[in-house]
Image (cartoon, coloured by chain):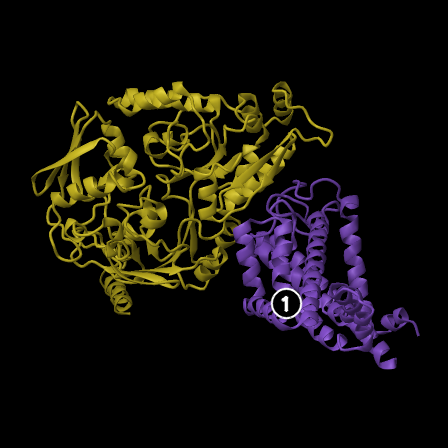
Chain colours: A yellow, B purple
Amino acid sequence: MSEITISRRTVLAGSALLLGSTALPTIGWAQSPKKGGRLVVAADSEPRNLNPAIVASNGVFFISSKIVEPLAEASFEGKDGLDPRLATSWEGAADGLSVTFKLREGVKWHDGKPFTSADVAFSALQIWKPLQNLGRTVFKDLEAVDTPDELTAVFKFAKPTPFQLIRNALPALSSVVPKHVYETGKIEENPANNAPVGTGPFKFAEHKSGEYYRLEKNADYWGKDQPYLDEIIYQVLPDRTSAASALEAEEIQLAAFSAVPLADLDRISKVPGLKVITKGYEGLTYQLVVEINHRRKELADLKVRQAIAHAIDKDFVVKTVFLGYAATATGPVPKNDPQFYTADVPTYTFDVAKANALLDEAGYSRGDDGKRFSLKLLPAPYFNETKQFGDYLRQALAAIGIDAQLVNNDSAAHIKAVYTDHAFDLAVGPPVFRGDPAISTTILVQSGIPDGVPFSNQGGYKNDELDALIAKASETLDPAARTELYKEFQKKVAADLPLINVAEWSFISVARDTVGNVANNPRWAVSNWADTWLEA
Amino acid sequence: MSPLRRFLLTPEAIAGAIILLALFAMALSASLFFPGDPQAIAGPALLPPFQHWSLPLGTDRLGRDVQAELFHGARTSLAVGLAAAAAALAVGAIVGTLAGFAGGVVDEVLMRVTDAFQTVPSFLLALAFVSIVGPSLGVVVAAIALGAWTGPARVARAEVLSIRERDFVAGARVIGMHPLEIAFREVLPNALPPVLALSSVIVAAAILTEAALSFLGLGDPNRVTWGGMIAEGRAVLRTAPFLSIIPGIALVLTVLGVYLAGEGVVETTAVRRSLS
């Protein structure tokens, strides 16, 4: 209320003094961030473990990235696409055996203790490397972290590790948690996993199961004048249709991660006071992928895999399943990646006749009922789009005489069926591209991964040439040479089709006009929101 | 007056019979009017109803013909409803007859088992069963029957308790018939009419349960079901409400039809009983 009177007074005073110049300051006023306010956001799931250092996934980041910060965050303008957070600079040694981080001064944990290099060393060695889902691969050769002083951390690697990879991994993999909270007892069972303590702009306040999470402003935050918001509430709305109505009723001000169904966006974009935002997810590209079980003799045949690739109308998938909010894929690296993508790969046009010819050639002719063979198809249940693509794929396969039987499972059963039991022939999966193929992409085709590792090659695919290429790229230090190797990798994957990349999509946010500084970095929804503000 | 004519004199029975006949016609003609896979993509996505002559009820999010899905869905609903009711009635009648006729320990054990099943809400039971065994048509039928057999069992037992004291049962014993033969050849047929009167309620409940399971994604994904259609339409409820409303209306009419026809039958037989 007081802010309204002030702004009104400013305008009145301005107009009384100098009529001509009033317009400029008023506009300036409206756009400069305001302090205070409570942001209410839709949350579609309630992660049990909120420790982003252990569980590096978007569902966890969405809430905990405001509390626990990484060493650096992704950025549109920053050098190498990064913006400093807990580290102010980072430098890789020429031999690839060490990376030196200079840390930010004067940062305090939410419990008042100072943040030091010991916390970084502890997080890296005790959590990222042994426990984190993604860190296990990226930091596998991390041997020690030297802490010559309180604000310097030197990562030592046993084998040369590309600095480019470490840099690309910083936003998602480097969440720092306090050593003094985690050093006693088992890290996985630490109560702070459910009520995180961090250095971020917001403190964890409470979680009411099935209702909301509440974060409150960290008054001691290192960012000047930040954060602007007093409070963030994550309203748990598991039903996807309810987010749209909650926005319209002004119960919530923001729905990220496509909580509003794509089919509703057209209508909701016309509602006054609401804006549909497609930016802010550039660093979180999901890929729609057909996972293939190469243990099936039909699918071990390249011609059959090519036929399936030719049978999928990618444009139809983008237009109908994603309603245009996606792009067709050519290979395992998404088109929007600035560093590694190459379009120079074998492509598969939508051509049913050719697909049929390939299957005939492979020796699988149609039976009396028009069917060549049957397959079990398991669409991942995490997204509406993956399920719908499963329905589409079944029809697309029917057109080339392959009878696909859909098997629906809940998330846990799906992960077990595909990644542990291998009880599938084809599966539809949504792996995430995280800015570097070595983080979570090469694992999708590499051989020798133990059973049970989710979102990895569990289709029994083995290609020595590709394995050698992946191994070589993982120890190539020169960024240019490394990028070339990953271009080669994309060509080989597109040619041999260990899996079929169909489309790439990101998410959509819907926010009220009053929310400021939305989508201002490529991982906005999972960044710290220190500069997000609300118009009163 | 013949029972059929008497049946046809009650207006609700006529309404029920018409709906049921229409439903059977839909189910039987589904393959005739809509040969091939009803889930095949037939046109542009999200076409509203009454826009195109060949797709009178419009299309869903992938461009599948809603009318074809509706007809094939009738088949699934009826098949599941009738099969689950038949299974529930059969199991219930057998358990009830055994318990009532044998008495003693057998009766105690069987009726306590029945009680145990009755205390668990039948939908929860079906939900748990399907999510453990995995969704397919047979499993769904078994899951629904699992929660529905207790009613017929109790009714059958009550009937058998009174029938077994009748003279003809004593007569059968005297001529040396095997007890099981007496139970199932002499007693059960006489105990059946009140048990069968439950069938309409069970069929209606089974159709609803099947729809609810499909709605929650626990139906057979390779078959069109009305519950599945409603669930699919839910994501676009605001932009294309017809996708949920059309199968919803079909579901309401079906359950209403089954119930009304069942009422008609019960009333007809009740009148006949009171007349005799």
Q: Chain of mark 1?
A: B
Q: Residue furthest left?
A: A149
Q: How far across and how far down the image is residue A469, in percent?
A: 35, 20
The answer to whether A19 is drawn above or below residue A175 in the figure is: below
**Numbered label tally:** 1
Which residue matches tag 1? B150
Between B106 and A64, the residue placed more toward the observer is B106
Between A137 and A89, the residue placed more toward the observer is A137
Residue at figure coordinates x 76%, y 48% from the top left = B30
Residue at figure coordinates x 13%, y 42% from the top left = A103
Q: Dot 1: few (<14), some (14–19), or many (≥20) neighbours within 10 Å?
A: many
Between A320 and A536, the residue placed more toward the observer is A320
User: Does residue A436 appear to the left or right of B56 in the view shown?
Assistant: left
Q: How far across and how far down the image is residue A20, in percent?
A: 27, 56
Q: How far across and how far down the image is residue B61, in percent?
A: 59, 46
Q: Can residue A60 be seen from the camera position used here?
A: yes
Q: How far across and how far down the image is residue A381, in percent?
A: 49, 46
Q: Residue furthest bottom?
A: B274
Residue at figure coordinates x 8%, y 43% from the top left = A150
Q: Where does the C terminus of chain A fall, quadrant-wise? A: bottom left
Q: Can residue A154 be seen from the camera position used here?
A: no
The answer to whether B254 is drawn above or below residue A49 in the figure is: below
For label 1, the SS is helix
User: Does residue B79 appear to the left or right of A348 in the view shown?
Assistant: right
Q: Where does the N terminus of chain A fall, quadrant-wise? A: bottom left
Q: Quadrant of residue A304?
A: top right
Inspect the image, locate mark 1, and give the three-letter code of the amino acid beneath it. Answer: Thr
